[in-house]
Amino acid sequence: MITQLPDAHQYVDPRYILANGQNTIITGNTLINTGPNNFKFSSTISSRPQIIIENINIDSSGPSLVLWKKSIGSAADDDALGHIYFVGLDSGDGTTTYVDIVGQSADVTHLDEAGKLDFQFIMDGTNGVSFLKMSAYNGAVNEGSIVFNDGSRDIDFRVESDNDANAFFIQGSDGKSGFGTATPNARVDIKSAGNSTVVFNCDSSLDNDSLFYVYQDADGDGLIRLQDAGANITFQAHSNGDNYFNGGPVFMSALKSGANQAAAGAAVNELWHDTNDNSIKIGV
């Protein structure tokens, strides 16, 4: 975790200064060793300075920006290999690191090397709050992870689609998830997109026909249906319409099977549908 700017990023007493109006071109292999100091580009012109790394070769490869931590003999897991800092002033003119993108060595084992990239922000005055962490090592070789909000802070997560600002939403304060809503009231909360739409659907692995779905009809009423493998409706519950079972025995109270109710341990005065003669019976 970055708690303050390293000394090398305090932006004081740079050894090399390129002032306004100066264009500097460096060609060939050039080594610039700044020692304990900084290499600073400074300008008072809006949207300047710019650092442009240009490659005019006609092949498919482009230029590279390399941050190289070369610690021979002392490489360790979770070493910080390089940072990209976004720094500005706060309301009291104090130097503040607002964003820090840090690359790390998640695993330095030879032939099993793995990297890690962490996007950190300052939040409520606290530096180094991880919003998104991607690692190619998760405690075992060939296992990685992508973690949002690793520090368990009150951070909402929202995915927007072409026509829904809250296609998927996780509420950071309590972990409730919403589909179509930014104010979920349950562990999973799904908001209908409108009348005559399927709110929730479960498809068969055999032919993608629906096995179970929740529907909002043209009048805004709710409907739940179960379907068999042939897409036949076997159960329907409608908040303002027909409710029925179809295609199998229906029992009230203890579970039964077929026509042999007594053998199944039925209690007297149960209501059930006998599929042998398509009758409704009470008791065994």
Image (cartoon, helix red, strand yellow):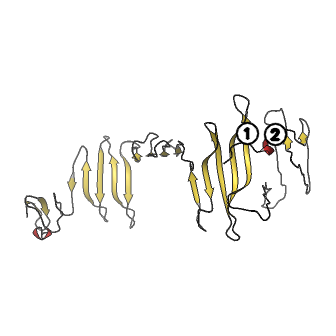
Q: Amino acid at mark 1?
A: Val
Could you say whether the residue bearing mark 1 is in a helix, strand or loop? Answer: strand
* Direction top: furthest residue: 92
Look at 82% across and 45% down and name the residue there: 51
Look at 56% across and 50% down and name the residue there: 148
Q: Amino acid at mark 2?
A: Tyr
Look at 63% across and 36% down and name the residue there: 125
Q: Earlier in the sequence, mark 2 or mark 1?
A: 2
Question: Mark 1 packing: few (<14 Cα in 10 Å), some, or many (20+)?
Answer: some
Task: Please say if 187 is above or below 284.
Answer: above
* Pointer 1 residue: 87
**In which quadrant of the rendered view does residue 233 lie?**
bottom left
Nearest to the eye among marks 2 and 1: give it.
2
Q: Work out whether residue 167 can be spotted.
A: no
What x and y, as percent, mark residue 34? 89, 48
Look at 23% across and 46% down and name the residue there: 241
What x and y, as percent, mark residue 274? 12, 64
* Pointer 2 residue: 11
Q: Work out whether residue 114 can be spotted.
A: yes
Task: Please say if 213 is above or below 158.
Answer: below
What x and y, as percent, mark residue 259? 12, 69
Left or right for 270, reference 6: left
**In which quadrant of the rendered view does residue 254 lie?**
bottom left
Left or right for 70, reference 228: right
Left or right for 196, reference 49: left
Q: Which mark is residue 264?
A: none
What x and y, as percent, mark residue 24? 91, 44
Viewer-proximal residue among 38 and 260: 38
Q: Quadrant of the C terminus?
A: bottom left
**In which quadrant of the rendered view does residue 47 lie?**
top right
